[in-house]
Amino acid sequence: MSDQELIDAFDGITVAVDQDGSMVGYFSWHRGSGAGADGVLAVRELHTLTVPATESLLAVAGSFDMVTPSIRFRTSGTDPMHWTIPAAGWSVTDVRP
């Protein structure tokens, strides 16, 4: 897949960089067409190398809350990102073996 094909496959790709300017994480996402109660931000990939990168990228995803009150992550179910989100802030909606 070329760089352009990767960019075109998502509505956006957000990166996290450290103080040295090195990329330490990213997430790719689809914004969808709904707003308000029907709005959803679908995060397709979230990869980070550091805890601060994870926290920063989750904060960016959360900043969509005014237009997309639901954020969907596809994870393994044992993904460590659950440790950074308060328990009241997320729920499992689908489990597939």
Image (spheres, rainbow, N blue to C red):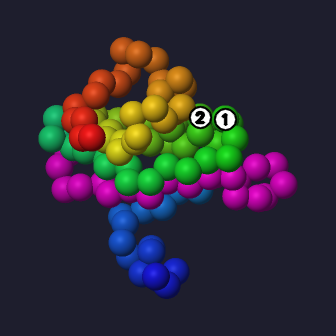
Q: Which of 41 and 64 lies nearest the eye of the viewer?
A: 41
Q: Residue 90 appears at what percent x and percent y?
A: 35, 24
Q: Magenta residues?
A: 16-35
* Residue drawn 46% across the image and 18% down it: 86
> Looking at the image, which residue is at 84% across and 55% down?
20
- Percent of width and height locating residue 85: 48, 24
Q: Residue at x 46, y 32 (%)?
A: 78
**Mark 1: which secondary structure?**
helix
- The amino acid type found where label 1 is placed reads Val
Task: Between label 1 and label 2, give the one nearer the viewer.
Answer: 1
The quarter in which the C terminus is drawn is top left
Q: Are marks 1 and 2 in contact (CB under 8 Å)?
A: yes
Give 64 or 91, whichever is nearer the viewer.
91
Q: Left or right? Give the position of 50 relative to 34.
A: right
Q: Where is residue 58 in the image (x, y as percent from the top left)?
A: 50, 38
Q: Does the magenta stretch include residue 24?
A: yes
On the image, numbered disc 1 is attached to which residue? 51
- Looking at the image, the residue that sits furthest to the top is 88
Q: Name the residue under label 2.
A: 55
Amino acid type, callout 2? Glu
Q: Image quadrant of residue 5?
A: bottom left
Question: What residue occupies the far right of the structure in this picture?
Answer: 20
Q: Pointer 2: residues within 10 angstroms few (<14), some, or many (20+)? A: some
Q: Where is residue 34 in the image (x, y as percent from the top left)?
A: 17, 49
Residue in front for this viewpoint, 49 or 42? 49
